[in-house]
């Protein structure tokens, strides 16, 4: 489920379970702490992985699942990446983006 113009923030939040809501707060806090000057391109919940995520304009995803610590990964849309890089910090993800 993606948060788009066709749904409201209320609908998005109401569809999250308790641990998903906690994950959402972790993701929001990570965004505020690390990169709040960047625009958010997407907010959503991946029903296959259980990830709650924020997609940033620079191609980095901030994710959390089941209330676990946030992870940072690269949004693959438009990128031809052979590996699945996951980072513990926003800084590591930014440094990786500089290499591709």
Image (spheres, rainbow, N blue to C red):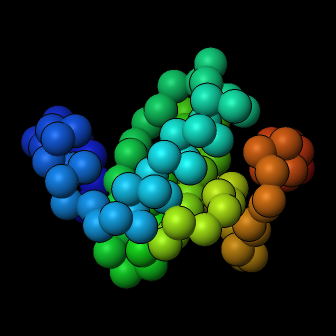
Residue 43 seen by the camera? yes
Residue 27: x and y in percent read 55, 48
> What residue do we see at 56% from left, 58% from top?
63
Q: Residue furthest bottom?
A: 48
Report which quarter residue 33 is drawn in: top right
45 on left or right of 29: left
Q: Quadrant of the N terminus?
A: bottom left
Report which quarter residue 94 is drawn in: top right
Q: Residue furthest top?
A: 37
13 on left or right of 40: left
85 on left or right of 45: right
> What residue do we see at 61% from left, 29% from top?
32
Residue 57: x and y in percent read 55, 34
81 on left or right of 20: right
Q: Is residue 81 above or below residue 74?
A: below
- Viewer-side residue, 1 vs 24: 24
How many numbered circles are shown?
A: 0
Residue 68: x and y in percent read 60, 68
> What residue do we see at 37% from left, 80% from top?
48
Q: Is residue 68 above or below residue 37?
A: below
Residue 45: x and y in percent read 35, 61
Residue 78 seen by the camera? no
Report which quarter residue 80 is drawn in: bottom right
> What residue do we see at 84% from left, 42% from top?
91
């Amino acid at each position: 489920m993606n948060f788009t113009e066709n749904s409201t923030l209320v609908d998005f939040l109401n569809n999250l379970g308790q641990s998903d809501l906690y994950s959402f707060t972790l993701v929001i806090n990570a965004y505020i702490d690390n990169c709040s000057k960047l625009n958010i391109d997407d907010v959503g919940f991946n029903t296959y992985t259980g990830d709650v995520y924020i997609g940033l304009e620079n191609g980095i995803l901030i994710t959390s699942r089941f209330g676990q610590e946030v992870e940072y990964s690269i949004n693959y849309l438009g990128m031809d990446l052979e590996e699945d890089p996951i980072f513990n910090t926003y800084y590591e993800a930014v440094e990786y983006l500089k290499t591709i």
